[in-house]
């Protein structure tokens, strides 16, 4: 069985331009998965796009920083920033509060559940959980999220750690790669969570291109796809979209590059799939399929 590859677009629901790109890329056969932001400004439009593309795997992109909560702010005070209404804007501020013990784990669970249930009420059955800014790489965040996944019948979660073979490609800045390697020291604790260890919540062998966030050009994506190991299951995390006026009105550091990533997927994924040893495109809902099975994991004719 060849390698299985999840190409997942984050930020589904942030803008209608991002939603449109995700629908188009899925229809083109190059994007099997996306993760939906429950409090995204274009949430309702994203639900319509998902409904129009039933083969698209849709996860829940849990937001705990740099966004708005679904829960009433007074019910999750340890997660709320200085304005009293939204999450902390800065990831650094969030991590600092986390390390100082100022964030309540029960409130993480409450907000995560509220976000998942919003998707479910809209008719979305999440294939997996992941987090904005990969915050669940911290055990204090992963633990309640894994509990919520089990409670809600969600069978998979993103492995938020980049594999060494991907880091060795030297994408992104040296400082970012060093930070990702240091964060990688937490991987053993992630894999030790009982839900992961016992296979009750499934995951991959790692998430590729975290180091290349904001620099995922066609050249970079092509290099990653050529370096993909012949066995295993990996996710490539990407952020395609359209850099339009709506995107200008939301908080994001990825603007013009969303066009770059959209075009990179259209250019490079068909090339990778044309090879005899091509990976099988899947979404997180397919992870329970036995890799030793001769049957294809999904029908990739989206």
Image: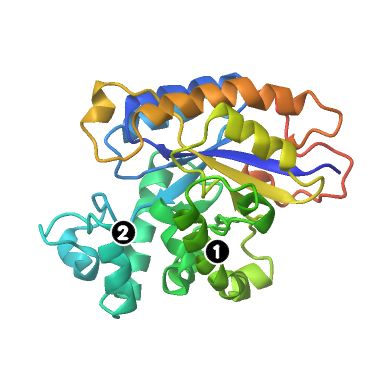
Viewer-proximal residue among 104 and 154: 104
Q: Choose top left, top right, bottom left or bottom right for residue 298.
A: top right
Question: For mark 1, does the 10 Å Cα neighbourhood hold few (<14), some (14 to 19), or many (20 or more) residues?
Answer: some
Q: Which mark is residue 181?
A: 1
Q: Are marks 2 and 1 in contact (CB under 8 Å)?
A: no
CA distance separating discs 2 and 1: 18 Å
Vertical placement of 157 versus 104: above or below? above
Q: Is residue 76 left or right of residue 16?
A: left
Vertical placement of 242 versus 130: above or below? above
Viewer-proximal residue among 169 and 141: 169
Quadrant into which the C terminus falls: top right
Quadrant into which the N terminus falls: top right
Residue 101 visible in the shown view: yes
Q: Which mark is residue 91?
A: 2
Residue 31 visible in the shown view: no
Viewer-proximal residue among 163 and 65: 163
Quick one: SS at disc 2? helix
Vertical placement of 48 versus 205: above or below? above
What x and y, as percent, mark residue 2? 83, 42
Q: Residue furthest front?
A: 174
Q: Which mark is residue 70?
A: none
What x and y, as percent, mark residue 267? 61, 20
Q: Is residue 44 left or right of residue 184?
A: left
Which mark is first along the chain, 1 or 2?
2
- Say which residue appears at 38% left-offset and 23% top-offset: 242
Quick one: SS at disc 1? helix
Q: Is residue 83 left or right of residue 222?
A: left
Mark 2, mark 1: which one is toward the viewer?
A: 1
- Say which residue appears at 37% left-offset and 67% top-offset: 109
Q: Residue furthest left?
A: 83
What x and y, as percent, mark residue 85? 14, 55
What x and y, as percent, mark residue 227? 73, 42
């Amino acid at each position: 069985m060849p390698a299985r590859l999840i190409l997942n677009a984050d930020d589904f629901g942030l803008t209608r331009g991002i939603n449109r790109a995700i629908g188009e890329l899925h229809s083109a056969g190059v994007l099997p998965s996306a993760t939906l932001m429950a409090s995204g400004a274009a949430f309702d439009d994203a639900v319509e796009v998902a409904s129009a593309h039933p083969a698209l795997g849709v996860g829940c992109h849990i937001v705990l920083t740099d966004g708005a909560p679904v829960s009433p702010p007074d019910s999750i005070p340890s997660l709320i920033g200085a304005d009293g209404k939204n999450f902390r804007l800065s990831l650094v501020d969030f991590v600092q509060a986390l390390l100082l013990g100022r964030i309540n784990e029960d409130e993480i669970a409450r907000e995560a559940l509220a976000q998942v249930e919003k998707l479910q009420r809209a008719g979305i059955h999440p294939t997996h959980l992941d987090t904005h800014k990969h915050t669940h790489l911290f055990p204090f965040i992963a633990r309640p999220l894994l509990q919520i996944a089990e409670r809600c019948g969600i069978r998979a979660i993103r492995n938020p750690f980049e594999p060494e073979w991907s880091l060795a490609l030297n994408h992104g800045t040296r400082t970012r790669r060093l930070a990702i390697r240091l964060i990688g020291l937490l991987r053993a604790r992630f894999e030790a969570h009982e839900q992961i260890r016992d296979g009750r919540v499934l995951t991959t062998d790692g998430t590729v291109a975290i180091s290349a966030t904001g620099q995922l050009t066609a050249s970079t994506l092509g290099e990653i796809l050529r370096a993909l190991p012949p066995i295993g299951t990996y996710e490539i995390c990407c952020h395609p979209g359209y850099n339009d006026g709506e995107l200008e009105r939301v908080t994001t550091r990825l603007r013009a590059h969303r066009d770059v990533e959209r075009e990179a997927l259209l250019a490079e994924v068909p090339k990778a799939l044309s090879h005899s040893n091509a990976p099988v495109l899947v979404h997180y809902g397919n992870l329970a399929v036995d890799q030793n099975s001769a049957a294809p994991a999904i029908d990739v004719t989206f």
